[in-house]
Amino acid sequence: MTEPVTLASPTFTTNRPIPLAEFAADIERRRREAGEPDVPRNSGARPTPSKRALLAAIEKAGGRW
């Protein structure tokens, strides 16, 4: 038997990786069951110092976030 693989949640482990297509289908199923909730996006109005540094580095490199 192989060792469990720890995924995004430290309380969730599995003995096999979950394929991306299976993960996406699970998310879609959960959204349908929840009635397609409108989840607000993070406005970004209060960036942390590390986020400010990251955005500055992206801009300095010629990118735009």
Image (cartoon, helix red, strand yellow):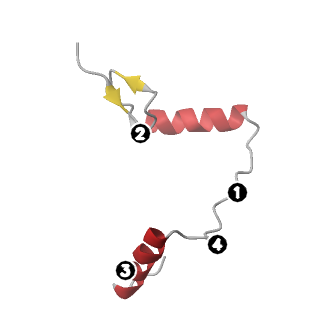
Residue 40 is tagged as 1
Q: Which mark's residue is nearer the viewer, 2 or 3?
A: 3
In front of the other: 5 or 52: 52
Distance from disc 3 to disc 1, alpha carbons, whole Å, reads 27 Å
Would residue 42 be found to the left or right of residue 3 on screen?
Answer: right
Q: What separation in Å lies between label 2 and label 3 (alpha carbons)?
A: 30 Å
The residue depicted at 33 percent of the width and 20 percent of the height is: 15
Dividing the image into 4 quarters, which one contains the N terminus? top left
Mark in the foreground, 3 or 1? 3
Helix, strand, or loop for circle 4? loop
Q: Residue at x 45, y 27 (%)?
A: 12
- Residue 46 position within the rendered picture, expressed as x and y whole percent measured from the top left: 61, 70
Q: Nearer the viewer, residue 38 or 11?
A: 11
- Mark 2: few, some, or many residues within 10 Å (few <14, many ≥20)? few
Distance from the alpha carbon under mark 4 to that under mark 3: 18 Å
How much space separates mark 4 and mark 1, taking CA atoms? 13 Å
Q: Earlier in the sequence, mark 4 or mark 1?
A: 1
Residue under label 2: 20
The residue beneath circle 3 is: 57
For label 4, count other residues whose C-alpha is less than 10 Å away and answer few (under 14), some (14-19) or many (20+): few
* Sequence-earlier tag: 1 or 2: 2
**Badge 1: few (under 14), some or many (20 or more) residues near its Cα, within 10 Å?**
few
| Amino acid at circle 1 | Pro
Q: Please tell me which of labels 2 and 3 falls first in the chain.
A: 2
Residue in the foreground of this view, choosing between 61 and 24: 61
Q: Marks 2 and 4: CB-CB under 8 Å?
A: no
SS category of the residue bearing label 2: helix
Helix, strand or loop at mark 1: loop
Q: Position of residue 19 (x, y in %)?
A: 38, 34
State the image coordinates of residue 5 (x, y, percent, origin top left). Answer: 32, 28
Seen as rendered, the residue at the extreme front is 49
> Residue 49: x and y, percent?
47, 72
